[in-house]
Image (spheres, rainbow, N blue to C red):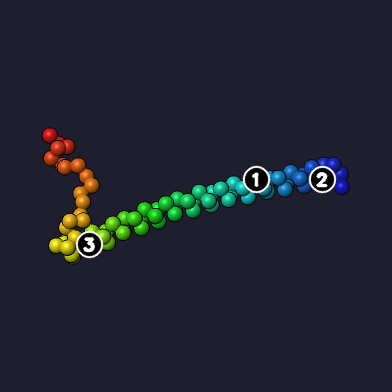
Amino acid sequence: MTAEQIISVVGLVGFGGILKASFDFLVATRKAKQDAKQTMKETRYKAIILLCYALVNYEKEKTTLVINRPPLSEEFN
């Protein structure tokens, strides 16, 4: 083997490593986004289930219901 062939083989291995690293990064980024979306959906669905439960059992649960927003009348005055 000549020096040029050795350099090209080493370059090819290095280039393959760079391609693999960039592919792994893209896959990890996409998975992180999907996980964040899934977590947001789960949180939203849990809140909906709790509100439905409170609606069905309103007399028992009305003391635990808390409004977490400012009054609308003060915002528009």
Looking at the image, is 37 positioned above or below residue 56? above
Which mark is in front, 2 or 1?
Answer: 1
Mark 3 neighbour density, 10 Å: few (under 14) some (14–19) many (20 or more) = few
Is 58 displayed left or right of 2 in the figure? left
Residue for point 19% across, 42% down: 70
Q: Position of residue 71 (x, y in %)?
A: 16, 42
Mark 2 neighbour density, 10 Å: few (under 14) some (14–19) many (20 or more) = few
Name the residue tied to disc 1: 18
> At label 2, which amino acid type do we have?
Gln
Which mark is in front, 1 or 3?
Answer: 3
Is 9 displayed left or right of 42 in the figure? right
> At label 1, which amino acid type do we have?
Ile
Looking at the image, is 57 positioned above or below residue 32? below
Element at label 1: helix
Q: Position of residue 9 (x, y in %)?
A: 77, 47
Mark 3 or 2 closer to N-term? 2
Looking at the image, is 31 positioned above or below residue 10? below
Residue for point 23% across, 47% down: 68
Residue for point 74% across, 43% down: 11
Name the residue tied to disc 3: 52
> At label 3, which amino acid type do we have?
Cys
Name the residue tied to disc 2: 5
